[in-house]
Image: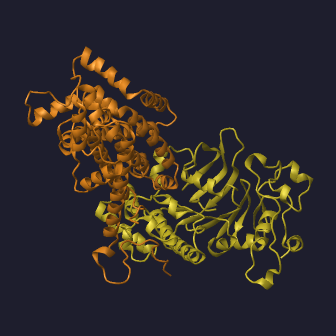
Chain colours: A yellow, B orange
Amino acid sequence: MTDTPPLLSIDNLAIGQGDNAPIVERIRFTVARGETVGLVGESGCGKSMTALATMGLLPGSLRVRAGEIRLDGAPIHALSQRKLRHLRGPSMSMIYQEPLTALNPVMTVGAQIREVLTTHLGLSRAKAHARAIELLTLTRIPDPAARMGQYPHQMSGGMRQRVVIAIAIACQPSLLIADEPTTALDVTVQAQILRLLKQLQTEQNLGLLLITHDLGVVRQVADRIVVMYAGSVVEEGDTDTVLDNPAHPYTAGLIAARPKGSRTEGAGRLADIPGSVPAPENRPTGCVFRDRCAIGQAICEGRRPLLTAHAGHSVRCHFPLSAASLASEVPS
Amino acid sequence: MTDTGPKTGNGTSGTGPRTALSSPTVRYVLRRLLQAALVMVLVMVGSFLLVKLAPGDFVDALAGTRDLTADQIAELRARYGLDQPVFVQLIRYMSLLATFDFGYSPINAAPVMDVILARLPVTAILVVASVTLSMVVGTVFSVIASRNAGRPLDLVISIFMLLLYATPSFIIAVLMILVFSVHLGWLPIAGFESVGMGYTGWTRFWDVVEHLTMPVIALCTFYIAIYGRIGRASMLEVLKLDFVRTARGKGLTEHRIFYVHALRNALLPLVTMAGLQVSSLMGGAVLIETIFGLPGMGRTAFDAVFQRDTNLLLGVVFMSSLCVVIVNYVIDMLYMVLDPRVNLK
């Protein structure tokens, strides 16, 4: 590592409600400036909660129970809402899954972009208006000046997400968290939004944390990948390394469960991982994946594996797969 | 590389020449007017038949208070058309109504229109003042309660709202009279204004304000509780929505999130409630009008029922219904201003 701390570093993070079983625990990863990190996993594995914890936006009575979150080296997980407020927007911001509900239905799009600029940059109304049009232009929304006076319901899903992106990049944050930004959109629009995010990331040297369950999306845009399962990080490394040589049986299962591009290649049914993600209070002892794992053994029940280096990346498994064993374990 | 266009455009006109009738706004207004007229006709026919179902007419009521000969009774009935079959009476009444002729009020010895025009302002002032006051006070309570949700202050307000909700308005009215008029002597006991003082201008205004303070408060208490409770629930609901999280994620101040983002969305159900409040107060303030001796619409209707003054009763019904129809229209318009998603259909 270099002398400068990574842009975002999450270490040993646990999130939970009161004394209940933690929703996520021992989460550890970093995002560097100008880097795109893909955070993947099935629904319910704690991806979004990790993101919301970073923003200080955990819902209800969920709290950070252990570990730390650092932004530019400074711990932010224990900051008051008052202090966090000044980081949200200028230092970090977030793009949400459902752009319709993420925008206020009774305010114009222009007003919703302007208020970020007036709040954090102290711009006058007129200057904020001009800057908001520039931001909308950056997101390649058609006819940006006319959009300013429109309400979210008058726009298509893709345009709404462009507005959410414009709001997120308004104060040129160094960290951008995108929580399933394309899930609610049409396939054709998905590709446009991803391209836009990737381009903004390169232009503004953003650290981008992209949360998704779509491995295809990760392959397209992420430099590194963090795979989460049942509240833990199970594998982490360069995108190509992990996707080409998955070492954790869960990652291998996720890859095998993807529909193939052509019909001839896959030949037949999609592979699936038996069972489903257990709720936090039902997680097994030892390795959290053991009751869905094809290669689990006695030690997996007794001892929780550590995140250890393996074949150029990290994996949390007692029996990491090698390229050779993968060929025999996972039908392709 | 462009997204699909807006799903719902504004003012996107169809093909063909644009005439006044093809404008959606004009068509909307016309349709609403037609609906209103239909509602009014149905209300009037229904009310007329209901009144006629009740035994006795105003001649019977009159005969109960003074000695009338059988000839005089027959003559009175003939003069007011009360000897005709109900169906004929209905046709006659409705055709007169179509020319905005409400007929004659025998008990007031004056045209119904004059009686109503003299009393409508009393009720109008009562209703407007009560709706405004209860909405403002109720909203303030709901804002304080939801900002402090789960804290002791929220509980105190909740209990206070429940008290206002559960106490009948006439009890509050009588208690206020006892305290503020009888013991303290601050406010007049009854009436709309001081009679025979010849006040004009601001002096008259403040005189009316003094007289109406207690009736307006009595009419408000129940609705303050309603607004307070609905507003608090609505506010807490809205604060859970995604766009509030977005607003927080934008680093806005809590003040702005609360008052700019959440409050406007949370007010929508209160506006609906205000429409209902106007409707029920228009003719439903009988008790309070009676306690405070106010010559309003409720009292007028009440007297008309007991003295079998059909024309006056129907006139009050007509005016109240008209007000309700108009208020509903205004509420719909207000909704469109407050919530841009609501559109002219």
Q: Which one is nearer the viewer's eye here, A271 or A173?
A: A271
Q: Which one is nearer the viewer's eye here, A19 or A188?
A: A188
Q: Position of residue A131 (x, y in %)?
A: 36, 67
Would you identify the image quadrant in which residue B147 lies?
top left
Q: Position of residue B81 (x, y in %)?
A: 26, 46
Would you identify the image quadrant in which residue B41 lies?
bottom left
Would you identify the image quadrant in which residue B317 lies?
top left
In the rendered view, does B64 fall on the left or right side of A294? left
Q: Position of residue B235 (x, y in %)?
A: 46, 45
Q: Residue furthest front?
A: B71
Q: Quadrant of the C terminus of chain B?
A: bottom left
Residue drawn at the location 49% of the way across and 71% of the way down: A156
Q: Is residue B75 above or below residue B100?
A: above
In the rendered view, does A330 fall on the left or right side of B105? right
Q: How many numbered marks have been drawn onto this rendered protein structure? A: 0
Residue B299 in view here: no
Q: Position of residue B291 (x, y in %)?
A: 30, 26
In the rendered view, does A13 fall on the left or right side of B320? right
Q: Residue furthest right?
A: A298
Q: Is residue B43 above or below residue B169?
A: below
Residue drawn at the location 28% of the way across and 27% of the way down: B64
